[in-house]
Image: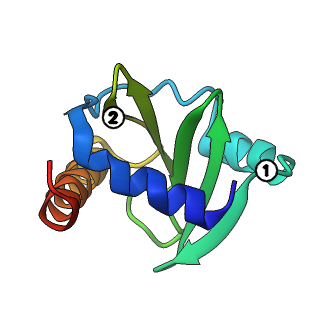
Amino acid sequence: MSLRILATAVALLALIATAGASGNSDIGYPSPEAALEALRKNPDAQFSIKGGWTIVSLSEGGNIVMWSFAPKEHPAYPAAVKRIMSQKEGAWYLEMKILCGGTKADCDKLAAEFNELNERMKKDIREHHGT
C-alpha cells in the first residue's frame, strides 16, 4: 500500500465514530517479537523508524493496520501496539490492541500514551478536514 493511500485513509479518520479499548491484547501473535518477525516476511508491509520505534503499515482485509514496536530501551519493552482502521457504513473506526511485556504500570502508561495519541490524531484531522 502506498503512503499516499495511507495518508488519504488517515485523512478520512475525521469520520471516526469510536476508538477501541486499550485493554485488548489479542494482536494475533504470541509475542511482539513473533509479530515483528512475521511482518518482516510480509512483502506488503512498509517499515519505518520514528523516535526509536519500529512502525509497520499495511492493509489487511481492506483495513489499514499500523503497528508500533517499542525500542529495547522503552520501559514497556517488549511491546507491540496494533491499530486497525476500518470503515463501516461510511464511518471510520479505530481499534487498538496492545501486547506488553513490561510491568503493569509501564504497560498502563503505554496504553494511556497511545490513547492520547489517538485522540490528538482525531482532533488534528477534524481541525484540518472537518467532521
Q: Amino acid at mark 2?
A: Trp
Looking at the image, residue 65 sits to the left or right of residue 58; the answer is left
Q: Earlier in the sequence, mark 2 or mark 1?
A: 1
Q: Which residue does the numbered mark 1 point to in the structure image?
A: 44
Which residue is disc 2 drawn over?
92
Residue 111 in the image, given as x and y percentages of width and height? 27, 46
Q: Is residue 87 left or right of residue 92?
A: right
Q: Residues within 10 Å of mark 2 (few under 14, many from 20)?
A: some
Res 40 → quadrant: bottom right
- Residue 78 visible to the viewer: no
Q: Nearer the viewer, residue 18 or 53?
A: 18
Task: Tell me the kind of residue under disc 1.
Answer: Asp
User: What's the residue at 40%, 54% (across, down)?
Assistant: 10
Give the Cα distance between marks 2 and 1.
Answer: 22 Å
Residue 76 disc label: none
SS class of the residue under badge 1? loop
At a point 60% along the width and 31% down the height, the residue shown is: 62
